[in-house]
Amino acid sequence: MELTVYEEKMEKSLSNLQEEYTSIRAGRANPHILDKIQVDYYGTMSPLQSVANISVPEARMIQIQPWDASLIKDIEKAILSSDLGLTPANDGKAIRLVFPELTEERRKELVKDVKKKGEAAKVAVRNIRRDANDAVKKEAKANEISEDEQKQLEDEIQKLTDKYISEIDSTIDGKSNEVMTV
């Protein structure tokens, strides 16, 4: 039996968590929080990155310079309707997003969110472990593998699970520390 399928699924759970963490802002400007924003570009919804240059001129500011100045209003609208909680300021040529300093209370809320998302990723990994173990038991029942092979595969599955759970834990700790750092 091949375990790479299950390992790939666990890897996807981890990378999905890391992707979710890029959208949690930690008080400093991170252009990745704009990754999910779509702008109406001549009737087609396009990612913000494909219609504008995004830069971080200061630690707590993102500057969005559209290649087509007529898009400024649409970009502003897209940012306001997103769940970023930021108010764009535009000077006719570019849009600036200023990140306010996070309060202690807000940081603690964000850490709770970080932990909740991490817990969901761990649950996903454990579900993948269960599926893998079920597949091994099914093969053993059908006499496709011996008891020794079953035991060995279950040990390998557990080692994979432990590896990804610990990687998720370190990802949670890293993001929590980032959020709590002023």
Image: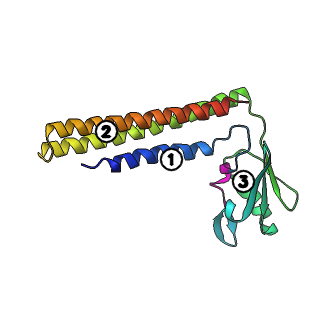
Whole-number angstrom distance, CA of label 1 to CA of label 3:
23 Å
Q: Is residue 159 visible?
A: yes
Q: Are marks 2 and 3 in contact (CB under 8 Å)?
A: no
Q: Which residue is mark 3?
A: 79
Residue 164 or residue 122, whichever sits in front: 164
Residue 70 or residue 178, whichever sits in front: 178
* Mark 2 / mark 3, whichever is N-terminal: 3
Closer to viewer: mark 1 or mark 2: 2
Q: Which residue is mark 1?
A: 16
Q: Which residues are magenta?
A: 32-38
The answer to whether 79 is drawn above or below residue 118 in the figure is: below
Residue 136 or residue 23, whichever sits in front: 136
Give the residue type at disc 3. Ile
User: Residue drawn 24% across and 42% down?
Assistant: 134
* Category of crowding for the residue at label 2, using alpha-carbon neighbours closer than 10 angstroms: few (below 14), some (14–19), many (at least 20): many
From the viewer's perspective, is 159 left or right of 83? left
The answer to whether 77 is drawn above or below residue 112 in the figure is: below
